[in-house]
Image (tube, rainbow, N blue to C red):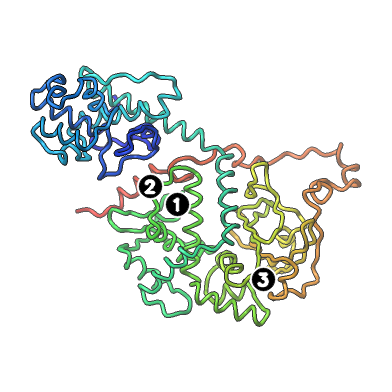
Amino acid sequence: MVTVDPSRISVPHSAYAAVPVRGAGVVGAPTEPSPDEVDALTLGRRIRERRLAAGMTLGRLAEAIDRAPSQVSAIENGKREPRLSMLRTIALALGTTADELLRPDAPSERAALEIAVERAQRGPVFAALGLDPFRVAKTMNDQTLQTILALHNEIDRLHRERAATPEEARRANAQLRAEMRARDNFYPELEAKAAELLEAVGHAGGPVSHQLVADMASHLGYSLHYVGDLPHSTRSVTDKRNGRIYLPTQQSPSRDSRSPILQALASHLLGHEEPGNYGDFLRQRIETNYLTAAILLPEQAAVRYLTEAKNLRRISMEELRDHFAVSYETAAHRFTNLATARLDIPVHFMKVHESGTIIKAYENDSVRFPSDALGAVEGTTVCRNWTARTVFDVEDRFSPWYQYTDTSSGTFWCTSRIEKAKEGEYSVSVGVPFEHVKWFRGRETPHRAVSRCPDESCCRRAPDELAGKWADASWPAARTPTSLLAALPTGTFPGVDQTEVYQFLEAHAPRT
């Protein structure tokens, strides 16, 4: 048996697509009524409930307000929205007030259930299935309506999951990367948020300590709790109801222990709601990572440090990392935020897995990243001759690796370093066009390479001599990546097991 609590009915956002909007007088506005704004369906149900409570027929109410019964019926069914003057006339005839009729809550649990079903019928799911709307009759019991609503919500969920294809995610990623390029990857509003929080906890300069991060959590009304059973699919879990942030007791040696805290606080500071699609999810991740880095490397201090390094012609990702006590990746990321907007240096950034797959990338310096037909860079393979790949062959993993690469779009200088993670090794690289290398340490490097990609003769096709010798004498057994067979993670927070998270919160919630 399917049961739905009418007091907690939540119709997917798409189900409101055809609900008349208060004051608009038209249908088709894709917005859900806010908690303090009544919609036509709720208004109509309140009028009907009040009329029946007063023992009035539809005809009597129509006569009292000098309107046709069909007009009153359309109002009660949420198909027509009365003007304020008519609403006052209706309220007077029913012995109530317009304010009472305009209350945003449904007049009863049954009415809430009927409204939810009506909204579902006016949404895209019914239309896509070719189903004709039906009248919600009094003879339909609550269980019937609950079952219809539950089926609608499940179909809507499956439809949204089916739409969440890898192509959608990659298209959203490409769009966000274009936006970042247009803004030089600099977001003043996020810089202001970081500065405001740092000032609130009395940061006076220097690296942001772990204690200061804990003070930020306290300032925002959160306490930190380190646990050994954090859900495996999460880095942290925030209990917004009880003001708690749960973190793992064992920290990864490759990750800054402050970052998960700041990322959790960033979502709170930025007012993130549950993402409705992959575009929302990716944007929230970008904003969260940006704000985290802006807190760990405050704009004013970082710009002052980098400006001095530029004047001395010795900008270095390693020195930036050490000065602010952050990870190399965070330092490299933060440099891309400030390089163009504050130092007038175009730049590109890459995070590449040891397999050659691009995990993250950003550019505004005209470098040509490999991309797919949708314009997405992430997931493609970088040229073997680029610094992001050649660094894996370097024996000295403790020293920075610098290299010039001649490409079809110009010569670029890059600095790269190997980092480790549970997924394997990956390189983090920062590069600039040749004319801007004069500001960086490592510009005197003798290492140089040539890349002709995407020409297959560059590195994607085996040399003729080797191919001639082994083409007919080899049969490799491929190790199929699990990601090739796995479906793209779905759900509100892709890749996160919501059931596991809810069970975790239930087990750790404070008992009263």
Q: Is residue 293 above or below residue 485?
A: below
Which residue is identified by label 1? 234
Q: Earlier in the sequence, mark 1 or mark 3?
A: 1
In the rendering, at what x and y percent does residue 387 appear? Answer: 73, 61
Where is residue 157 drawn, in percent x and y? 42, 33
Mark 1 or mark 2, which has the lower sequence index? 1
Query: Is 238 on the left or on the right of 356, as rendered?
Result: left
Q: Quadrant of residue 48?
A: top left
C-alpha separation, residue under disc 1 versus residue under disc 3: 31 Å
- Front residue of 144/95: it is 95
Instruction: Give above or below for 285 relative to 86.
Output: below
Query: Residue at horizontal 47%, vertical 58%?
Result: 288
| Circle 2: element type | helix
Mark closest to the chain's N terminus, 3 or 2: 3
Residue picked out by circle 3: 398
At numbered mark 1, what does the secondary structure look like: helix, strand or loop? Answer: loop
Residue lying at the far front in this picture: please name it: 66
Residue 71 lies left or right of residue 14; in this view the side is: left
Relative to the observer, which residue lies in front, 431 or 408? 408
Residue at the spot of label 2 = 501
Disc 1 to disc 2: CB gap under 8 Å: yes
Crowding at dot 3, Cα within 10 Å, few <14 / some 14-19 / many 20+, comes out as few
Q: Quadrant of the N terminus?
A: top left
CA–CA distance in space, label 3 to label 2: 39 Å
**Amino acid bearing label 3:** Phe
Say if mark 1 contacts mark 3, CB within 8 Å.
no
Decide if residue 381 is on the left or right side of residue 233: right
Q: Is residue 115 above or below residue 438?
A: above
Give above or below for 135 relative to 19: above
Question: Which one is in front, 115 or 27?
Answer: 27
Which of the 4 image quarters holds residue 363? bottom right
Q: Position of residue 105 (x, y in %)?
A: 21, 39
